[in-house]
Image (cartoon, rainbow, N blue to C red):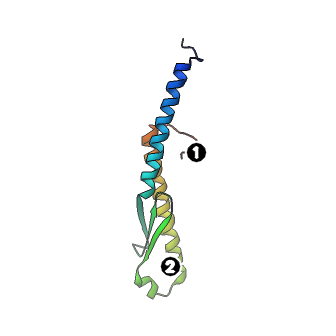
Amino acid sequence: MANPFDLSSMGDLMKQAKVMQEKLTSLQAEISVRTVEASAGGGMVTAKVNGKLQVLAVTIDPEIIRSDDREMLQDLVVAAVNEAIRQAQAMMSDEMSKLTGGLRIPGLG
């Protein structure tokens, strides 16, 4: 049975943790510049969100503005932004899962 107090094993574990931290930092930087787009209302409203979950753009079809239905426009903007955020979160979760091999690490999603 291995000695649980073996310091050489602890050193190896610390090296592995450092490598994982470096990979995580690199992945977070890479994901932060990726973007996703989602639309609502058959493409009448489109939202673009980055990996930092920041809304970068909202595009609105001029036809919906002409319809003078403000409530529908508001609902479509909310729906498009929420879907884009959901897609960005899923993208981040997928990439983190690849990095950690599916291991659930608290604080990493």
Sooner in the amino-acid sequence: mark 1 or mark 2: 2
Q: Residues within 10 Å of mark 1 (few under 14, many from 20)?
A: few
| Numbered-mark total | 2
What amino acid is at disc 2?
Leu
**Disc sitting over residue 28 in the figure:** none
- Name the foreground residue: 84 vs 40: 84
Single out the residue that lies furthest toward the right.
5
Mark 1 — residue? Answer: 107
Looking at the image, is mark 1 or mark 2 nearer the viewer? 1
Residue at figure coordinates x 41%, y 76% from the top left: 44
Taking 66 as reference, is 104 above or below it? Answer: above
Q: Residues within 10 Å of mark 2 (few under 14, many from 20)?
A: many
Mark 2 — residue? Answer: 73
Residue 37 placement, left or right of 81? left
Pinpoint residue 102: horizontal percent, then vertical percent.
Answer: 46, 38
Kindly indicate whether the residue at mark 2 contacts the one at mark 1 (C-beta within 8 angstroms): no
Residue 3 placement, left or right of 44? right
- Name the foreground residue: 84 vs 75: 84
Taking 61 as reference, is 56 above or below it? Answer: above
> Quick one: quadrant of the N terminus?
top right
Pinpoint residue 5: horizontal percent, then vertical percent.
Answer: 60, 17
Taking 51 as reference, is 104 above or below it? Answer: above
Pinpoint residue 82: horizontal percent, then vertical percent.
Answer: 51, 64
Residue at figure coordinates x 47%, y 41% from the top left: 22
Pinpoint residue 9: horizontal percent, then vertical percent.
Answer: 52, 21
Cα distance in 3D space between marks 1 and 2: 36 Å
What amino acid is at disc 1?
Gly
Q: Secondary structure at mark 1?
A: loop
Residue at figure coordinates x 55%, y 24% from the top left: 10
Residue at figure coordinates x 51%, y 63% from the top left: 54
Q: Secondary structure at mark 2?
A: helix
